[in-house]
Amino acid sequence: MSLDYTCYALAKRPLTPQKLAKASPDWCIEFVDPENGKPLHKSRALPSFCVVWGCPRFARLDLAALVRAASGDSLRELERRSQLGSCALEIETDFVANSEFLAELPPRHRRVLAGAKSRYDTCSSASRGGNLSWPLQAAVCRAVALAVGGMLEEPQIGKFQAVSAKG
């Protein structure tokens, strides 16, 4: 089973890792190329798909060094021991809300979702172990919403929350 968390963002252009890190001060977050395992450039727009590794800032882990030096297996072991979380991140930059979907929402959510220009979907495996992946997904999506404004969705329970940009 997978756990999903989504942000419908009011900006079309993908954000940079640097902007998302700034919008999520309580988390250390690294965005990684899924093909070569290398960290993505901090000031370049995120690609349509990447892997995200993260931990709460109070964990005092040097996440950037761990990601640069570690293999996927060693990072997954840290995740299994609940020291790191991870998720997949997929960005759809040409998002248009489905009219049937919009019709099912309360008017206050409908307006925000109708204005969304992109969608950030995070996904993790519920069975892979560790307990930081779900909070990481929420932190990544909340960072997107705080950076540009948008709507958060927890698809498993159908919960929506509008979030205004903070900078």
Image (cartoon, rainbow, N blue to C red):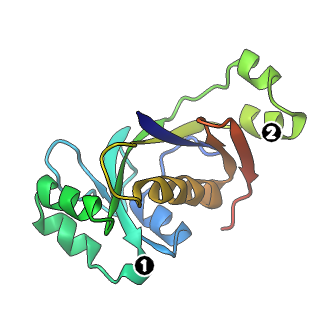
Q: Position of residue 167 (x, y in %)?
A: 66, 68
The percent coordinates of residue 155 (x first, y second) are: 60, 35
Q: Residue at x 40, y 33 (%)?
A: 1
- Residue located at (34% from left, 42% from top): 127
Q: CA distance from mark 2 to mark 1?
A: 32 Å
Q: Residue 40: image x %, image y %? A: 27, 56
Residue 57: assigned label: 1
The answer to which of 29 and 133 lies nearer the viewer is 133
SS for callout 1? helix
Q: Is residue 93 above or below residue 141?
A: above
Residue type beneath disc 1: Arg
- Residue type at mark 2? His
First along the sequence among labels 2 and 1? 1
Residue that sits furthest to the top in the current view = 100
The quadrant where residue 5 appears: top right
Q: Residue at x 30, y 46 (%)?
A: 128
Which of the numbered marks, if any, corresponds to residue 109? 2
Give neighbour class at mark 1: few <14, some 14-19, many 20+ (Cα, 10 Å). Answer: some
Of 55 and 141, which appears nearest the observer? Answer: 55
Frontmost residue, 43 versus 61: 61
Q: How many labels sit on residues?
A: 2
* Left or right of 89, for residue 76: left
Where disc 2 sits, the SS reads helix
